[in-house]
Amino acid sequence: MDADPDELSRIARELAAREPIFHKPEFGTSRHDFDRLMAKDYWEIGASGQKYSREFVLSVLEKRHEESVSEHLTVTDFACRCIAMDTYLVTYQLEQDGGRLTRRSTLWQYSSEGWQILYHQGTLISGSPETVINS
């Protein structure tokens, strides 16, 4: 789906400010905040390959934010693509404390309620993160 380059650039900046999801206190720290960020049929695939329901993720986030959390997170290789009307795929690489590297993808949708997350996936990177395999 083609999008106006200036509009796509603006949207990419908006979504980049929200990633990594659930780690930006300015977008919420409570179960209620996270509930509003997620579509009602949200689900995710963790770096382990496990599928997590919306309810499970909300419970984990609620526990995580009971205490103050200090993390060092670095996002690189950020990209944003319009995949349908008001729906965008965001991909990036995330480095967490301890050198843990993952590739992340999030489906975002814009509505009258604002931005909502439809789906998220994290995949552990093994080997060189710069490796691109061409067939």
Image (cartoon, helix red, strand yellow):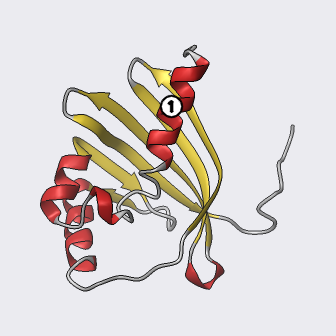
Residue at the spot 45% in from the left edge and 43% down from the top edge: 15
Q: Is residue 15 left or right of residue 67?
A: right
Residue 94 image-quadrant placement? bottom right
The spot of residue 18 in percent (x, y) is 41, 51
| Label 1 Cα neighbours within 10 Å, binned few <14 / some 14-19 / many ≥20 | few
Q: Amino acid at mark 1?
A: Arg
Compared to 34, does 71 lie above or below? below
Q: Is residue 101 left or right of residue 20?
A: right
Residue found at the far right of this picture: 135
Residue found at the far left of this picture: 32
Compared to 43, does 60 lie above or below? below
The spot of residue 47 in percent (x, y) is 51, 65
Q: Which residue is mark 1?
A: 10
Nearest the viewer among 120 and 75 is 75
Task: Examine the rendering and report whether any part of residue 32 can be seen.
Answer: yes
Task: Examine the rendering and report whether any part of residue 106 can be seen.
Answer: no
Residue at the spot 31% in from the left edge and 65% down from the top edge: 25
Residue 93 image-quadrant placement? bottom right
